Image (cartoon, rainbow, N blue to C red):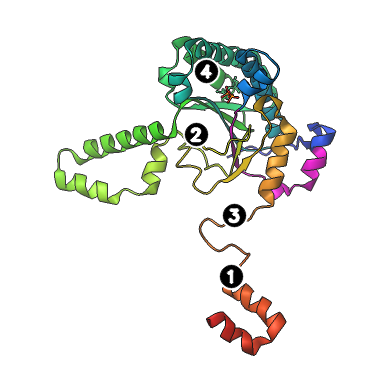
Amino acid sequence: MRAPQHSRVHELSVEEQAIYRELDPARIPRHVAIIMDGNGRWAGKRMLKRFLGHQQGAESVQYVVETASRIDLPWLTLYAFSLENNLRRPRAEVNFLMKLLKSYLVGNVKRMNDNNVRMAYIGRIHELPAEVQDTMQWASEATAKNTGTTLTLALNYGARSELVDAMRATLRDAITESEGDFARLQGLIAEMDECHVSRRLYTAAMPDPDLVVRTSGEQRISNFLLWQIAYAEIFVTDRLWPDFRGIHLLEAIADFQRRERRYGGLGDGFTDEKLAEKLAEHHGAGDTAELVRR
Ligand code: FPP
């Protein structure tokens, strides 16, 4: 259970407060996931090397996390480093990102604690350099008691490999549990449902994201949380990640609150009953029943 907290909304900037006032505090998403994109383009536009774009991107991370914590957003997940980044980017860039991550954690744990932020990670963490893993573990232990926003960094993360890892774990457990009894194994397989899969994902302890934000205008999901975002709203902004601030997170949430979420159902907007009411206003009840039937 989350400990009740004092509102920290007064800590938002004046501009942020103006947007926050328009929001319905009861409908702040539980979980926002962000695909941080555009660091390279930000640097290129300024004739700077790519690594300076990443460095600036790390600054944006802290601004956004602190705004999230001030509005008491329970879960914020950031796509910081994909499996594909690890495999396909030049080694020098990957090494730089690893160093940046380490220095980001070392430099910001105190601020995380000041903001009651708890740190977590998803991805094939065990494949990252040992000293980076050590720093990550230190940061998560140092912030473990915090009860505000959980900041999850997706590192060496790919949604398809997450699903592969989940399948392996599920099968391994079923085989162990069946103790060599083939009929029992078949029964366990037949019983498997969506909950079994969810429980095996890196995100087992989190709610699914309500809102996915992608910066830099690309309209792609890029192998991010494929299972978990089945019903998430997607918000794409042309703004490049190093220019993204807390105020832009609030704008994305405002946009989210203007949407109607249906989860495959009909929502409040357009049911046959609503149609009948609308038509009745125009035609009178007698004709309406006939029109709805058609
Ligand atoms: C995409 O920009 C961003 C990344 C591959 C890495 C994201 C990393 C950070 C925001 C900084 C470090 C993060 C932490 C948590 C310290 P890109 O290089 O793909 O940009 P481009 O598409 O414009 O080339």
Q: Amino acid at mark 4?
A: Met
Q: Earlier in the sequence, mark 3 or mark 4?
A: 4
Pointer 2 and pointer 4: residues touching (CB < 8 Å)?
no
Q: Earlier in the sequence, mark 2 or mark 1?
A: 2
Pointer 1 and pointer 4: residues touching (CB < 8 Å)?
no
- The image quarter containing residue 126 is top left
Q: Position of residue 7 (x, y in %)?
A: 75, 38
Q: Position of residue 146 (x, y in %)?
A: 62, 28
What residue is pinned by disc 1? Answer: 271
Q: Nearer the viewer, mark 2 or mark 4?
A: 2
In three-dimensional space, the C-alpha distance between marks 2 and 1, rounded to whole angstroms, equals: 35 Å
In three-dimensional space, the C-alpha distance between marks 3 and 1, rounded to whole angstroms, equals: 14 Å
The answer to whether residue 169 is left or right of residue 272 is: left
Q: Is residue 110 above or below residue 63?
A: above
- The image quarter containing residue 53 is top right
- Label 4 neighbourhood size at 10 Å, few (<14), some (14-19), many (20+)? many
Q: Which mark is residue 136?
A: 4
What residue is pinned by disc 2? Answer: 222
